[in-house]
Amino acid sequence: MTAQVPAVRSAAEPTAGRSRRARQGDMATEDDFAEFVRVALPDLLRYGHALTGNPHDAADLVQTVLERVGARWAKLSQQCEDPRAYVRKSMANAHVSRWRRLRRETLLAEFPDVPAEQDRDRLENEPLWQALRGLPPRQRAVLVLRYYEGLSEAEIAATLAVSAGTVKSQASKALASLRRRLGPVFESGGV
C-alpha cells in the first residue's frame, strides 16, 4: 500500500483542478480497497465460516463488515497498521452482536404443520463443527484465531481488544468444553 500525499492547492489554482485531484485521490483509495478485498477475501470468508459455522452466514458477515470498512477506508488505511486485523476484529464483534440479537427466543401461537426443509451444510454432522458451533462466540473466536488463523495470544488480544489473560482463560474454557463434548465421540471411534 502506498501512502497518500495530500495535494496542496495554491491560491491561484482553479477549483476545478482541485476537484479533479480529489477525484483521482478517491479513485486511488478505491483501488487500494479493491486490491485489499481481492487479496484478503478468501481468508476472511474462511474466518467467517469458522466463526459462524455456516458459509452463507459467513458471506453475509464478511459483506457487512467490508461495507462498513470500505466507507471509511481512506481514514482507516492511513491510521491502521494492519487492516486485516481490524477487519477480523470487526467481524468478531459483528458476529457477537448478531448472535446476541438473534439468540432471543421467538414465540409462536401454533407450530407449523410441516417443518420447513433447510439446506444441509456438508459439515453439519461433523462432531468437531457441532462442538465448535456450541461454544459461546468469544470462545469460538479465540479458538479460530489461535488454531485456524495461527495468531499468537498477543495478536488475538489486540484483535479482540481484551487482555492476554482473557485470551488464555477463554481458550482454556473452550478447549475443556470441546474435550467434554468430543471425548465420547473419540472413545467410541466415531471420528
Image (cartoon, helix red, strand yellow):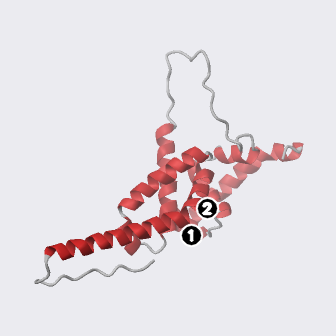
Q: How many angstroms separate mark 1 from mark 2 (CA)?
A: 9 Å
Image position of 178 (left or right of 136): right
Disc 1 secondary structure class: helix
Position of residue 147 measured from the top left corner of the image (x, y, whole percent): 68, 62
Between 13 and 109, the one lying in front of the other is: 13
Mark 1 or mark 2, earlier in chain:
2
Between 130 and 48, the one lying in front of the other is: 48
Above/below status of 94 relative to 155: above
Name the kind of residue labelled 2 in the image. Answer: Leu
Above/below status of 93 relative to 146: above
Q: Residues within 10 Å of mark 1 (few under 14, many from 20)?
A: some
Image position of 123 (left or right of 186): left
Image position of 79 (left or right of 173): left
- Residue at left offset 46%, top offset 75%: 81
Q: Which mark is residue 155?
A: 1
- Residue at left offset 63%, top offset 27%: 117
Residue 73 seen in the figure = yes
Q: Quadrant of the N terminus?
A: bottom left
Q: Which mark is residue 97?
A: none
Disc 2 secondary structure class: helix
> Marks 2 and 1: in contact by CB < 8 Å?
yes
Image position of 171 (left or right of 92): right
Between 172 and 100, the one lying in front of the other is: 100
Q: Residue furthest left?
A: 12
Above/below status of 163 relative to 81: above
Quadrant in the rendering for residue 145? bottom right
- Residue at left offset 70%, top offset 49%: 177
Residue identifier under label 2: 145
Name the kind of residue labelled 1 in the image. Answer: Glu
Position of residue 101 measured from the top left corner of the image (x, y, whole percent): 46, 40
Q: Residues within 10 Å of mark 2 (few under 14, many from 20)?
A: many
Position of residue 19 measured from the top left corner of the image (x, y, whole percent): 21, 71
